[in-house]
Image (cartoon, rainbow, N blue to C red):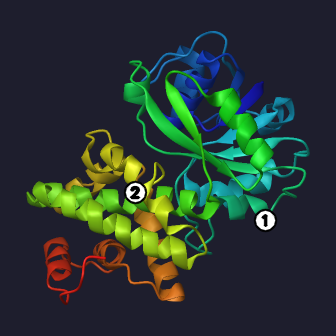
Amino acid sequence: MKISVLGCGRWGSCIAWYLDKIGHDVMTCGLKDAPEYIRLSTTRKNDYLTFPESISFSSELSVAVERAEVIVISISSQYLRSYFEDISKNDLDGKIIVLCMKGVEVNTGKRLSQVVGDFVDESKTPIAVWVGPGHPQDYVKGIPNCMVIDSDNQQVKELLVGEFNSDLIRFYLGTDLIGSEIGAASKNVVGIAAGILDGLGYTSLKGALMARGTREIARLIKALGGNEFSAYGLCHLGDYEATLFSPWSHNRKYGEELVKGNRFEKLAEGVMTSKALYELGREYGVDLPIVESIYKVLFENADAKTALRRLFLRSVKEEF
């Protein structure tokens, strides 16, 4: 299968490496002036892995799109709309779009598949999402994990799982696109909360954060028309180890450095996602205390320790 991976950051480069490893014809596409693309295309290496000679490169979006049967996109979620304005200038009929980012568009509250849906006819260009746990640092060592591919198109979903499945990544067929996307996006917000707990020395509270965070996001998924049990699957709860505990988690690290007064330079998708989820919670009348606390810390300069303390001063209620 001819696959073009658009985006060559940490996850995009791992996806290209993985898809080549399991036998696909892979091209990596990035911005010609971007440091990560320059490094990969000239040295075939980054901080995590080494590309084999079988992976080709292009900085021309039209070249990467035209050759592909499947277009895998891994960029910052908030840039997806502007990026797709360029992608959609090409003929996309008959191609499959696979989104590997985790976020919600902050200006519209749309899931990422809905953003792409604004540009394509899904009967001709089906859309799928690839979500779940895993770090490049583990995959390149041969440490396996489980992930999910979801889509409203059952045939495409089954095709992708069949083509992408291996001993390194076991894929499951998602059954709830709303839940898969919202769950995957919101785990990054919970990851920031976990980092704040680490920074404050409250690491033992992360168990409670996991339990209550999952319940909170389940309520939001249900309100949006999804299956609330999706929050307890691989897209959300199943991704907590990689997000709430891992030293490699950008979102956890962001929260920890925030509390310590340090600036974290790398992308933490949970920052803008917290704002998007906060607005969705208000729009749909869903109580999201953890999301609201993180939003207020990040966007209203609330004190992190005070915001967390307020979570424990909430009125007594039954757990479920």
Q: Which residue is mark 1?
A: 118
- Image quarter of residue 77: bottom right
Residue 271 drawn at (x, y percent):
40, 63
Classify mark 2: residues with Cα within 10 Å, few (<14), some (14-19) or many (20+): many
Instruction: Find out whether the residues at labels 1 and 2 contact each other: C-beta distance under 8 Å.
Output: no
Which of the numbered marks, if any, corresponds to residue 188?
Answer: 2
Please tell me which of labels 1 and 2 falls first in the chain. Answer: 1
Residue 162 drawn at (x, y percent):
69, 30
Amino acid on which the number 1 mark rests in the picture:
Asp
State the CA–CA distance, disc 1 to disc 2. 25 Å
In the displayed structure image, the side of residue 40 where residue 278 appears, left or right: left
Q: Quadrant of the N terminus?
A: top right
Q: Is residue 169 placed above or below 254 in the rendered structure? A: above
- Image quarter of residue 73: top right
Q: Quadrant of the C terminus?
A: bottom left
Look at 24% across and 63% down and name the residue there: 209
Residue 98 drawn at (x, y percent):
69, 44
